[in-house]
Image: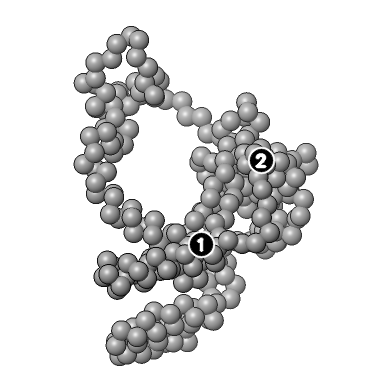
Amino acid sequence: MKKFKDLQTRSQRKNTDKVRTHYVKNAVLNLCDSPIPQKHESVLNMGPNLVPTDSRIPYMDIISTTECPSLKLEYNGNVENAQTLRKDVLSALKTAKTLRSNLTYDQRLAIKEMKNDTNISIYPFDKGTGFVRINKCEALQKIEEQLGTAKIIETDPTNTIATSIRAELCKLNKKRRFTKTEYQNIYPSDPVPPRMYGAIKAHKPEKNYPMRIIVSTIGTATYGISEYLVKLTQPLLNKNKTHLKNETEFVNDAKNWTISPTEVQV
């Protein structure tokens, strides 16, 4: 109810000088028994969006990344464009200079120490920008609580799933159901299994900071198909009568509802 009323009166508050109280949680939550070192806290306070500058230029990574689109251009007959791309990248690498470090020596040393520490793990906040410092065994326990009863399999089924998908896609492609570009994007050439990681709900201390499980399916065998289907179904969702764009639209639509005292919003 508080959030609902807050949204309703948002436009009115813009024209008033009413003082509001903001509650800001710390950027680093330490759940370990040991105190966090000052140089570690200095790095973690910079937030998860910090990108440390590289001390060296990754020549091989840039060249290999450039070669993939260059080969695609040559395959499609654009040999001249492929050669131009290679020359431009080569020219940029010859004149490239390393960037000035955006971290101090102690901060870089702190990152190395946190990586090499096998007993303590760093997890991001589920909501907001910040980090949680927690014992590794305790973090694994929180993950197991969310997973429940799980079964460990001996073989990776990724290749079997990918083979089955390739066979079905080949059948549809022979019927010309896809364009050439669509087929290349959907086809699982070198898939990986889904990766699971966790984010700690730092805003729920009353529940002992539970873990939220997140599964990344980027690069999996079905990722291309999912992306293709989303592009097809997304325009239809906007035409659905029960679809809401955001919370403001929800508030505006709710003003016209007639709700009886016995009804409950779900």
The secondary structure type at the circle numbered 1 is helix
Q: Nearer the viewer, residue 218 or 10?
A: 218
Q: Tell me residue 139's x, y (percent).
A: 69, 43
User: Quick check: can you spot residue 30?
Assistant: no
Q: Nearer the viewer, residue 55 or 116?
A: 116
Residue at (62%, 35%) from the top-left corner? Answer: 210
Instruction: Report, in whole angstroms, how far the alpha carbon at label 1 lies from the one at label 2.
Output: 24 Å
The quarter of the picture where the N terminus appears is: top left
Residue at (77%, 50%) from the top-left corner? Answer: 119
Residue at (33%, 55%) from the top-left corner? Answer: 229
User: Quick check: can you spot residue 24?
Assistant: yes
The secondary structure type at the circle numbered 2 is loop
Given the image, on which type of amino acid does mark 1 rest?
Ile
Quarter where residue 224 is shown: bottom left
Badge 1 is on which residue?
161
Label 2 CA crowd tier, 10 Å (few <14, some 14–19, many 20+): few
Given the image, on which type of amino acid does mark 2 rest?
Thr
Badge 2 is on which residue?
149
